[in-house]
Image (cartoon, helix red, strand yellow):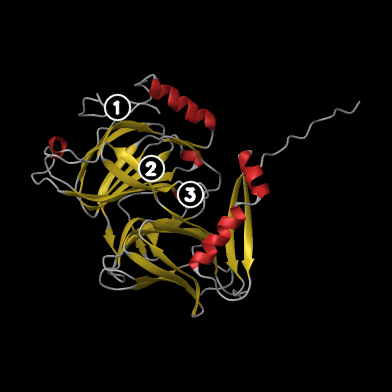
Amino acid sequence: TKKKFKKKKKKIDLIHRRLLLKGKELTSEHRTLLLKIADRCPVHNTLESDHVRIKTSLNDDDNDDHENMVTLLATFQARSSELSPGFQVQRVLPYRKQRSVGSFIFLDHFGPLDFDPTNGPFLNVGPHPHIGLCTLTYLYKGKLLHRDSTGAQALIEPGGVNFMIAGKGVVHSERGKPGDLAQATDTLPNQCHGIQLWLALPASSQFIDPTFYSTRSIPMAKFPQCTLIIGTFNEYTQSDIPLLPQMGSLFLIDIDLTTKNITLPLQKIPQQPLIEIGIFVVSGSVRISFINNNKEHHQTTMNQGVTAVFNYSFHADDATNGFISFQSLEENTRIAFFGGTPLPEPRIMRWNFVAVDKADIDSAAQAWTNLDRSRFPPVVNEANDDSIPLP
């Protein structure tokens, strides 16, 4: 007798559709409108209601067979969110149509905020947990004090980088109040401005032991307007923060266009023909364009709070680098330029927890609700009396 086996159906998580643009080059406003129209497709809405993500991108029809290809995935405006009482942030990632850029799955922009050094308002985030990710904090102005359950304590100042690997579970706080800062500095700030990003840990390393690094960003000598915060870009590497090899290629660069515009080479990465690129306008406004074989592609104008995300495909047989150009349109224009190898599998995010499997999210949520100190130890050198409950 023949046994009959039911074939297990595979669930579709993501559909990626590309629209090929014909004719004259479109403006960034036209491109944004096209993406919005595509997103209103009835089939699109039906699929999204069944938890299938639809990613739409635009391709120009002027790339020949030996050019690197640039694909616009999304442009969007950051939205406002309250991080602590009286302290608003701009939430950039995750965005509904763009959940990640390379390994980066979260980006908050806070400030610029001027305040009374004694009365605030201050950025003050009480103890809260994380799993399955790394947090990265970078300051343009001000000071913050980091403490966590590994015993790490570090003051971060402008140009500083705090990097925490949450792994199987960590609890931390970020303090900007005078009473906390006085433990680490004699000078209290009257400004606060910075960004915090999260990076997804590789699936095979989601539950490693937590650890913490504090260092300085690295000036890029050939490009004086640029500072490398993390990762590798061309010949520059942030060696003070060791990254797991499975995270692939990634980078985060602070670009200050106050004095001069800049064009950066995009070098081919061995064994990685495709990278995702994110550009967030921290302040001012900028015109960006990609350059291949002396031709400009995807010229886009962006104002403060706007993010653009691109796929950049390197041609397999072409050793020629492409370039990306940044032209400041206002004084004090500043850019967060980031990206890397796309995540090989989707991530589930609930509150501060990130994982490949929903069961791991549920387990962490239950442990925090129960205040299970074997899973989430208390922050060292804190009373832990203002811990943030699970929403």
Would you say the residues marked 2 and 1 are in contact, meaning their CB atoms lie under 8 Å apart? no
In the image, 140 versus 332, the foreground residue is: 332
- Give the mark nearer the N terminus: 2 vs 1: 2
Q: What amino acid type should be assigned to the residue bearing mark 2?
A: Cys
Residue lying farthest to the bottom in this orientation? 294
Horizontal side of residue 187 vs 138, given as left or right: left
Provide residue 382's location: percent of width, then percent of height: 21, 28
In percent of the image, x 59 and y 66: which residue is there? 59
Q: What amino acid type should be assigned to the residue bearing mark 1?
A: Ser
Q: Does dot 3 land on a helix, a strand or a loop?
A: loop
In percent of the image, x 49 and y 80: which residue is there? 294
Residue denoted by label 1: 387
Q: Is residue 273 visible?
A: no
Quadrant including the C terminus: top left
Q: Does dot 1 land on a helix, a strand or a loop?
A: loop
Residue denoted by label 2: 134
Foreground: disc 2 or disc 1: 1
In percent of the image, x 40 and y 64: which residue is there? 302
Provide residue 23's location: percent of width, then percent of height: 62, 75
Q: Does dot 2 land on a helix, a strand or a loop?
A: strand
Provide residue 178's location: percent of width, then percent of height: 13, 38
Horizontal side of residue 129 vs 69, given as left or right: left
Q: Which mark is residue 128?
A: none
Few, some or many residues within 10 Å of mark 1 (<14, 14–19, 20+): some
Residue denoted by label 3: 100
Q: Is residue 20 visible?
A: yes
Horizontal side of residue 118 vs 231, given as left or right: left
Foreground: disc 3 or disc 2: 3
Q: What amino acid type should be assigned to the residue bearing mark 3?
A: Ser
Provide residue 281's location: percent of width, then percent of height: 36, 60
- Label 2 and label 1: CA atoms lie apart by 20 Å
